[in-house]
Image (cartoon, helix red, strand yellow):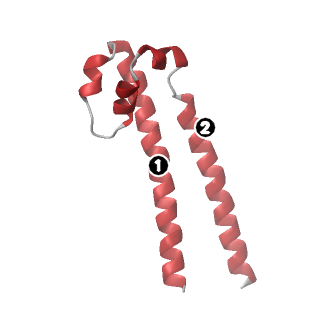
């Protein structure tokens, strides 16, 4: 039992460290404040949604790549959280 708790504790600590690194990587791609203030909030929110492309018509061409990079990194961050939670849930459900 002690070895199993050590393993679980190590996995949780490892997950937290990985999430912090992914979050730091994600926020490095965040557009600067001047660029965000340039567009209406509706356009910025639409740029973060997964399947919307209408926002690209309302944004300058040189800003599209910046917003797409940030959108990609936000998706990776959310995906890593979801996969970790699914892993914890499956471990708990099969363990007990």
Q: Is residue 71 above or below residue 84?
A: above
Query: Residue lying farthest front?
Result: 41
Q: Residue at x 27, y 35 (%)?
A: 52
Q: Residues within 10 Å of mark 2 (few under 14, many from 20)?
A: few
Q: Is residue 32 above or below residue 69?
A: above
Marks 2 and 1 in Cβ contact (< 8 Å): no
Which residue was labeled with disc 1?
A: 78
What residue is rendered at 46% in x and 40% in y? Answer: 74
Left or right of 76 in this view: 6: right
The C terminus, quarter of image: bottom right
Q: Residue at x 45, y 31 (%)?
A: 70
The residue tagged 2 is: 24
Question: Whole-percent x and y of residue 39?
Answer: 40, 17
Please identify the quarter of the rendering in which residue 16 is found.
bottom right
Q: Earlier in the sequence, mark 2 or mark 1?
A: 2
Q: Secondary structure at mark 1?
A: helix
Toward the viewer: 46 or 72?
46
Q: Kindly state the secondary structure of the residue where label 2 is placed.
A: helix
Residue 67 image label: none
Q: Is residue 25 above or below residue 19?
A: above
Residue that appears at 59% across and 49% down = 19
Q: Position of residue 1 (x, y in %)?
A: 71, 85
């Amino acid at each position: 039992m002690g070895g199993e708790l050590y393993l679980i504790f190590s996995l949780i600590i490892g997950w937290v460290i990985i999430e912090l690194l992914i979050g730091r990587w994600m926020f490095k791609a965040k557009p600067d404040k001047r660029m965000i203030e340039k567009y209406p909030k509706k356009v910025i929110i639409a740029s973060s949604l997964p399947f919307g492309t209408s926002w690209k018509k309302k944004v300058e061409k040189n800003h599209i790549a910046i917003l797409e990079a940030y959108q990609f990194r936000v998706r990776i961050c959310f995906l890593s959280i979801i996969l970790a939670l699914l892993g914890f849930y499956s471990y708990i459900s099969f363990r007990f």
